[in-house]
Amino acid sequence: MRELTLKEIEQVSGGGTIGDWAADGGALGSIAGTLATNTLRGAARGGLGGALVGASFGGGQVIGTALYDWLS
């Protein structure tokens, strides 16, 4: 059995970037929505907004990293 190369490690470990950012944003958004409104509706709306912002940030990170790798 051989050791993985750096490129192989990056491919395996970087697969869930968008989902990770969306999950973190959703968690923080639901906490912020609950604290702001003291309702479950506020928690749901905050979680949805946080997940959308997190997913867009994660997508930008993936595209930016790929562009940087391609240009360098």
Image (cartoon, rainbow, N blue to C red):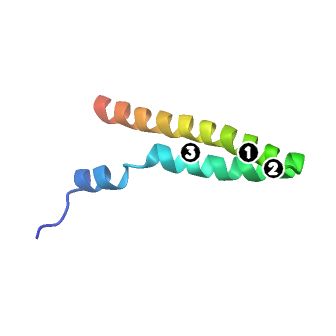
* Picture quadrant where residue 70 is located: top left
Amino acid type shown at disc 3: Ala
The correct choice, above or below, for 21 with respect to 70 in the image is below
The correct choice, above or below, for 9 with respect to 41 in the image is below
Toward the viewer: 70 or 2?
2
* Cα separation between marks 2 and 1: 6 Å
The correct choice, above or below, for 1 with respect to 64 in the image is below
In the image, taking residue 11 as reference, residue 28 lies left or right, namely right
Residue visible at 37% across and 50% down in the picture: 14
* Cα separation between marks 1 and 3: 14 Å
Residue visible at 32% across and 36% down in the picture: 69
Amino acid type shown at disc 2: Leu
Secondary element at tag 2: helix
Secondary element at tag 3: helix
Rendered image: mark on residue 44? 1
Image quadrant holding the N terminus, namely: bottom left
Rendered image: mark on residue 59? none
Of the two numbered discs 1 and 3 on the same chain, state the one appearing first in sequence. Answer: 3
Residue 11 position within the rendered picture, expressed as x and y whole percent measured from the top left: 29, 49
Amino acid type shown at disc 1: Ala
Q: Mark 2 points at which residue?
A: 40
Viewer-nearest of labels 1 and 3?
1
Residue visible at 43% across and 33% down in the picture: 64
Q: Mark 3 points at which residue?
A: 22
Of the two numbered discs 2 and 3 on the same chain, state the one appearing first in sequence. Answer: 3
Secondary element at tag 1: helix
Question: Is the Cβ of the residue at disc 2 closer than 8 Å to that at disc 1?
Answer: yes
Residue 13 position within the rendered picture, expressed as x and y whole percent measured from the top left: 35, 55
